[in-house]
Image: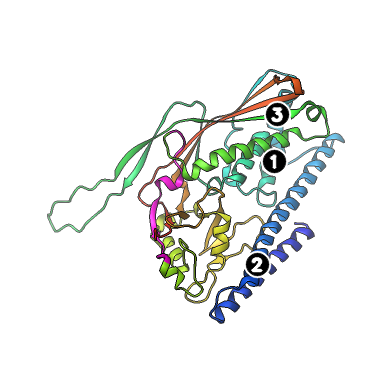
Amino acid sequence: MSEIAKKLQARRLNLVNEMRELVDKTVEEGRDLDGAETGRFQAMNEEIDRVDLRIKGVLEQEQRAKDAGDAFDGLIGKPKTGPENEQRDGQSSTEVALRKFFAGESGRTFDMSAPGRVDYRTLSKLSAAAGLNTVPTSFYNRLIAHLIEVSGVMQTDPTVLNTSSGESLQIPKTTAHSSAAIVAEAGTIGTSEPTFGQITLGSFKYGDLMQVSRELITDTGVDLEGYLAMQVGRALGNAFGTHLVTGTGTTQPRGILTDATLGVTGSTTAALAALTPPLPAGSFTADNLIDLQYSVISPYRSSNSCYWLMRDATLAAARKLKDTTGQYLWQPSLQLGAPDMLLGKPVRTDPFMPAVALSAKSVAFGDFSQYFVRMVGGLRFERSDDFAFSTDLVTYRCLLRADAALVDLTGAVKYFQGNAA
């Protein structure tokens, strides 16, 4: 890790401590943040977000420097070693074919399947220090990494199914577990079986149309693959990511909140206003989050895929909360690339989660491995030199087929809902 990254991490921790001191002061004085203090708290919160982005940028720059060094070693004939290079070399023919396709040197269509097993858990870490430097940086992986970067649900380690074709996929879903009971000597043992339903994972088609100037394509100094991977990945992530949270399941995937179970309902507007300090309508308290965590049973709560999910503004509110012993519920990460923790569990933010409001499902918690995401047949790229002929733009069309649904409806994932009044 570079000195710059270390200094940024130190700055982040200093900001966290300043925010806590500010909140502690108002709690001791039994009052809410005044106007100036609220502005200062929000400014520090925004600076933490900016520092996080800078840390990510520094780590990505270090990785690019490493990649450039590897490329230079290749030019001077220095042998490459290690599993990472072996994986990259194994994909070189695909990458060469892709570059020829983007440059218009091959056909008009390019179908790209996932390069073997895709490690979505590693890709979700989104930084070189956190794991990307151990993954071959193929075009497919870069595009999926940008898709995951946009979608918080895809960062919670859902179960991802890659299928080569798009026929309907029948998945059993658990709606109730079996139960046992004490039986007297020679008594009859009652029958109790788990209750199953069935869901069908289809293949909804997501498309993105992007136009690139011919000058950009022919400029050999431009990382065209990286540019296209970022633009297409984020576009698909915005469209798919919305449905991963609130999709209805009819003409779109079933969102995680669509099938999750109610865990805790917030206090009434009057009760929240009577607190010290008062809270807006639909807000959660520290006790609400503790109750939500323990509304999920231990096997799900102990899973490696157990996460909190909320939007950025909601996390900003959670950063101020303390338990009954005066300890903050939110624990900032002390390791670069690792997520922040809330009540000992990692937090992921998703811009598509509802904001805190009356009746809003603003916080989700549970075992997200019970949420199945189906990806069909990789990615399909198509290239047209004629669509925007008059403006000398080359048009690329990218198609992704996917679906998703929660397969365990017994309470694997639960949500906090603001009170209705």
- Marks 1, 3: nearer the viewer: 3
SS category of the residue bearing label 2: helix
Q: Residues within 10 Å of mark 1 (few under 14, many from 20)?
A: some
Q: Amino acid at mark 3?
A: Gln
Task: State the residue at coordinates (53%, 42%).
Answer: 242
Give the camera-side residue of 89 and 285. Answer: 285
How many numbered marks, from 0 up?
A: 3
Q: CA distance from mark 1 to mark 3?
A: 33 Å
- Marks 1, 2: nearer the viewer: 2
Q: CA distance from mark 3 to mark 2?
A: 41 Å
Q: CA distance from mark 1 to mark 2?
A: 47 Å
- Determine whether, in the image, residue 86 is placed left or right of residue 191: right
Q: Residues within 10 Å of mark 2 (few under 14, many from 20)?
A: few
SS category of the residue bearing label 1: helix
Q: Disc 3 marks which residue?
A: 211
Q: Amino acid at mark 2?
A: Gly
Vertical placement of residue 364 versus 100, above or below: below
Specify the label residue 84 is tagged with: 1
Quadrant the N terminus occupies: bottom right
Q: Disc 2 marks which residue?
A: 39
Q: Is residue 256 magenta?
A: yes
Vertical placement of residue 241 versus 395, above or below: below
Give the camera-side residue of 366 and 269. Answer: 269
The magenta stretch spans which residues? 251-269
